[in-house]
Image (tube, rainbow, N blue to C red):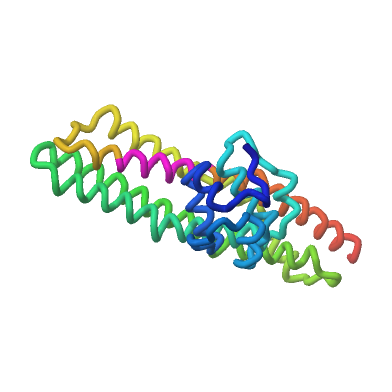
Amino acid sequence: MLITKNIKMADVIHMNYFTLSVLNRFGIELGFGDKTVAEVCKIENVDVDFFLEIVNAFVDKDYFPKKQLQTFSVKLITDYLRKTHYDYHQIKVPEIESLIEEMVKACYSEKENLVLLKKFFNDYKQELLNHTNREETVVFPYTIAIEDAFNSKTLDNSVFDLMETYSIAIFQNEHENIEEKLFDLKNIIIKYLPQPKNSENCHKLLYALFSLEQDIIDHSRIEDKVLVPKIREMEKVITKRFGEKK
């Protein structure tokens, strides 16, 4: 079922409770009563069309509005991607660390295996941090500079100089599939880790890992299918303008 602006925001959460993460990234707090998506977005000063494209892509994995998303500004897209980074590092990763720590404390046998699991995730956490830091400090500033240059009536030579040292193709080639290690981590737990006496924490940990993995896949999909093609086309236009000016 496609989410529209006339659906009650509360029903969006009932349809898929994972949308709570999306609402959080848009700064939408709970307690909106029976207000519709359009009404809540207006109150919270959220672009309702952008919200609908993101939330529908999040709920339905077969729905991906590539062309529609490309109509929105780079700044709007990168702002959402930045908020997902914050969500990973401030909410999802600490939750997983806490669950692993609880499993280590509650385990009186095979503790060595859980300590190795903890180290495996800590290594992944650092890799995720390096990945998001590079996007925050290099990729996103570059994409916004390209959009500014694309929208400007005057051509700044410094932007063309920037394009000679970096391009969205470099990002695309360097873009790692950081969710693959999460798959390996889940497999270790499912296939090889001796089950603790209380398996509830183990199941919670798996749910959290599946959630983070899917979220990162969605995040990467927006980058690869929307941001990269959008910036590539802008780079072409800027290069053509520069050549004509010369």
Q: Which residue shows up at 62% across the image and 55% down it?
A: 36
Quadrant of image for the N terminus = top right
Q: Is residue 172 visible?
A: no
Residue 19: x and y in percent read 51, 49
| For residue 79, side relative to residue 164 (left or right) | left
Residue farthest to the right, as pictured? 244
Magenta stretch, main secondary structure class: helix
Residue 199: x and y in percent read 21, 36
Residue 92: x and y in percent read 39, 53
Above or below, comparing residue 83 to residue 158 in the picture: above
Q: Which residue shows up at 53% across the image and 51% down it?
A: 10
Query: Observer-nearest residue: 77 or 135?
Result: 77
The part of the chain drawn in magenta is: 204-217
Residue farthest to the top, as pictured? 191
Above or below, comparing residue 58 to residue 31 in the picture: above
Q: Is residue 244 visible?
A: yes
| For residue 124, side relative to residue 3 (left or right) | left
Quadrant of image for the C terminus = bottom right
Q: Which residue shows up at 81% across the image and 69% down it?
A: 152
Above or below, comparing residue 159 to residue 23 in the picture: below
Would residue 44 be counted in the magenta stretch? no
